[in-house]
Image: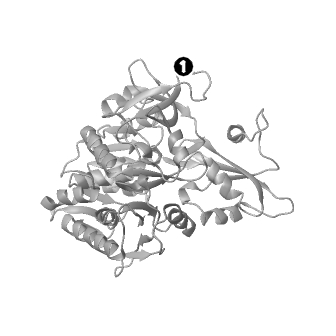
Amino acid sequence: MDNLGRLLLQRFAAYHDRPALCDSDGTVTYRELSEAAFAVERALRAGGLEPDEPVIVPVANEARDPAALIGTWLAGGVVVPVARGAPKAVIGAASAATGARFSLTNSPNECVSQIKTEPPPIRPLLRGAAIIDFTSGSTGRPKGVVLSHRAFVGKLDAIDSKLSFAPSTRAFLVLQITFIFGQWLMLLTLLKCGTLWMRSRFDPVNVLAALKDQCISDVALVPTMLRRIVALDDAISRPLIANAGRCRILTGGEPFGRELSTRLKELMPHAPVIDIYGSTETCSSDFFLTEEEREEFAETIGHPGPQVQIRIAHDQGLGSPVNGAGELQIRTPFIMNGYLDEYDMTRAAFEGGFFRTGDLARIREDGRVELVGRIKDIISRGGAKVSALELDRVLVQHPAVAAALTAGVPDPILGERIHALVVPRPGTDIDEKILREWIAGRIEKFKWPDVYHFGHELPTGRTGKVDRNALRDQVMDAEP
C-alpha cells in the first residue's frame, strides 16, 4: 500500500463502531474518524490541492488531529505538522519553507484555509511523500525531513514485529505528534484498530491516574517524564504507581540510564520497559532494548531492529577512536527521501549508503551498541532535540544583544537544561524578562533557554573560536 490514509481506512472498515480515540472532550469511533477524514479530503480536493503538495496541519494531541492527517493523505497531500498555538513566526517559517498554499483550520464550518495563491514548485523529493517533519539540525535552522508513505508503512510493520499491537491495545499518548515518536505510536495504534487516549500536556499525577482508570496497556514517555514520575512524593506516587504499574512503558528520545532503570524497577516491578533508539530520518525505532535486557544492559541501546544494518565509522573527522567509539551509521530501507530543498545537506548525511546519525557509539563484545556522546551540537532537553546554534541566532537578533552562546548542561530530570550566555551591547539595558518575552514569539516553547547568564565576552578555546563546551564547563563549575 503506497498511501497511509487509504491503508488506515481499509483497516477501520471492520471496526466502525469501536472507540478509536479519546481525549478530554470525549470519544471518537472509527466510523466517526473515517467520516472526519473524508471531510478533510473533500475540502482539500475542492480547493485544488495537487498531488504531493504540502499542507500545513496544526495539531495539539486532540482527537480531531488524526483525521486531519489521514484526510490530507487521502487527498494526495503531504502533511506538515505544526503545533497548534505555535508562534506565528514558526508557522510562517514552515509555510515559507514548504511553499504550502493550504492550512487546515479549527473552524467547524471551514476546515481548510488558503494562505497562498501560487502552488509550490514541483519537487521530485516529495513524490510519494507522507510527511515533512521539521527537526533541529547542526546548521542552526530546522531541517525538513521528508518521509515517504512506503518507508513509514514499512517501519510501522517493523515496529509492530517487536511490540505486537492489536485491537485490544489501549495506548496513552502525551508525546506531541509533531515529533516522530508520537506519530508512530498514534499511527500504529490506529493501524491495529486499538484505542488511543490523547492528552496535550504531561502531568505525572494525571498520567498515572489515567493509566490506572483506563486500564492502559501501552504508554510512550521520554526518560525526562519518567524521572518526574519517580521524583513524586511517595505519599502521592506509591498508591498511583501501585495501581498503574502493569502498563508497558515505551521510552526513547534521550539516554535512559541505569539509575532511572533501577528506580523504575523498584517502583513499578510489573511494568515492562522497552527503550527505543532511532532518528526522524530513519522513521525512528532502529534499536530496541527489551525488558529482559534492561536490568543488565541499561547503559546500552540494545540490538538493531528489523532490516537495520549498522556500522561504526572512525574516519568522520573524529580523531583517534576512544575505546572503539566512532560515529554510529545506519542503513535501512525505511529511510527519508531527503531534507527538503537541501541537496548538499542530504548528500552529506550519507556515507556509502549509511545514514550518519551524528552519535558516537561503540559495539560491545555481546553485540549491543553503547552510545558515548554526540558529534553534533544538539541539546537533548526532555527528549526533544534542540539546536544550540538556532538559539544563538535567535538571541542575537535582539537589538540589545551583541553576542550569545547556548549550551546543554547535564540535569537529573531533563537530561540537559539549556543555558544561554548573553553579551549586551554597550549602553543598552536588557535583562532575563526582556529576553524571555523576545524569544517566546519566535521559537517553540520546548526550545526556550532555562537559565540566562550575562557577561562581557563569550568563552573561547585554544584556537580562538567560541567554545560551547567551555560555557557548559563554566556553568557546571559554578553550580554548588
Q: Residue furthest top?
A: 365
Q: Is residue 224 above or below residue 133?
A: above
Depth order, front residue of 327/384: 327
Q: Is residue 71 above or below residue 320?
A: below
Q: In the displayed structure, does residue 444 sit left or right of residue 430?
A: left
Residue 5 percent location from the top left of the image:
27, 59
Q: Residues within 10 Å of mark 1 (few under 14, many from 20)?
A: few
Q: Is residue 204 above or below residue 316?
A: below
Q: Is residue 364 above or below residue 79?
A: above
Is residue 373 something one can see in this rendering?
yes
> What element does badge 1 sit on?
loop
Q: In the displayed structure, does residue 10 sit left or right of residue 74?
A: left
- Residue in the picture at 82% in, 58% down: 425
Q: In the displayed structure, does residue 253 sit left or right of residue 42?
A: right
- Residue in the picture at 86% in, 59% down: 426
Is residue 215 something one can see in this rendering?
no
Residue 31 percent location from the top left of the image:
19, 67
Task: Give the image quarter of residue 195.
Answer: bottom left
Residue 25 percent location from the top left of the image:
32, 70
Name the residue that disc number 1 marks. 323
- Residue in the picture at 31% in, 30% down: 292
- Residue in the picture at 28% in, 40% down: 158
Q: Residue furthest bottom?
A: 109
Which quadrant of the figure contains the C terminus? top right
Residue 382 percent location from the top left of the image:
50, 48
Depth order, front residue of 21/232: 21
Amino acid found under the numbered disc labelled 1: Asn
Depth order, front residue of 38/372: 38
Indicate the colouring scheme.
one colour
Depth order, front residue of 289/211: 289
- Counting the numbered discs, the total is 1
